[in-house]
Amino acid sequence: MEIGIIEAPTVKQLFIEKIAGLIISGELKPGDKLPSERELASQARISKSAVHFAMAELERLGFVKTNARHGTYVSDYAKDGTIETLSLLVNFSGESFLERNRMEDMLEMRMAIEGKAVERLAETLTKESVALLEEDIQRAEKTAAEKADLHSLALCFFDFHHDICFVSGNFILPLLFNSFRTVTLTYWEHAIRFLGREKCIQLMKDLLKVLKEKNARKSMAFLKQELDMYLTLVSDK
């Protein structure tokens, strides 16, 4: 068995996580001015170049903004962040990111993207598309039967729903859906804990069954019902 190379985080990455953590926790707020790169390097006892590249990355992620004349200030990451910012938020916040308001936002995003894919697919479903989705379900069943970890099974669910976007015929939808991969996997792992493996797999089968009826409105309603059911269930826990 090969476990592969274990790589420690770089000084730059640790510095990014430190500053981002202070901003996410609220210790640093939008508008707060940060010390100069020289001062930060001195405080952290790392090189100025490491701080410089870290600050550039933090700015790209929407956590800070730098003005050549006035210095660097904390930015509003909710306004200026990216998908990568969202992934960092999930990793930093852990289970607290699964609060109801966050879940509502994520499920609304899923409905916007996948709902359109389901609508299109219900009208254009082919035998090849059905075969691909059935393969995804079979892989999920095999993974569940092998009692694999939650992450492995969550990947099966992600692939099924991503393939719905892929075979919908819209070039952009699968790319959008895939950009939320890291974040949505966290939610699927959570869903498996609450609903159980068999229930999650049954929902895949039921969605495909509805899609085969080629009724766009009914297919979209089923997807929304599934998302609402999950939100209600976890909120009651």
Image (cartoon, rainbow, N blue to C red):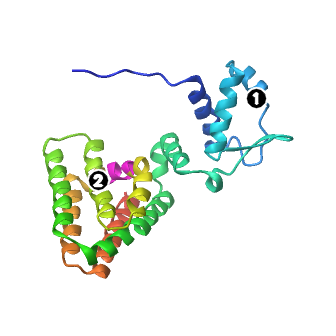
What kind of element bears circle 2? helix
Count of labels in the image: 2
The image shows residue 140, relative to residue 117, as above or below, that is above
Q: Position of residue 113 (x, y in %)?
A: 42, 66
Reply above or below: 101 against 76. Answer: below
Q: In this picture, which residue range is highlighted in magenta?
A: 185-191
The verdict on residue 190 being magenta is: yes
Q: Residues within 10 Å of mark 2 (few under 14, many from 20)?
A: many
Main SS class of the magenta portion in the image: helix
Q: Is residue 228 visible?
A: no
Quadrant in which the N terminus is drawn: top left
Viewer-side residue, 181 vs 173: 173
Residue type, numbered disc 2: Asp
Say which residue label 2 marks: 159
Q: Earlier in the sequence, mark 1 or mark 2?
A: 1
Callout 1: SS: helix
Disc 1 to disc 2, how far (Cα)?
43 Å
Quadrant in the picture for the C terminus: bottom left
At x 18%, y 45%, the residue is: 143
Residue at the location (61% across, 33% down)?
Answer: 16
20 displayed left or right of 110: right
Query: Disc 1 marks which residue?
Result: 37
Image coordinates of residue 2 in percent, x first then y, are: 25, 21
Q: Position of residue 134 (x, y in %)?
A: 16, 60
Image vertical order of residue 11 relative to residue 133, above or below: above
CA neighbours of label 1 inside 10 A, class few (<14), some (14 to 19), many (20+) = some
Residue 45 quadrant: top right
**Residue 218 appears at what percent x and percent y?**
28, 80
Is residue 119 located in the magenta-colored stretch of the structure? no
Q: Nearer the viewer, residue 214 or 109?
A: 214
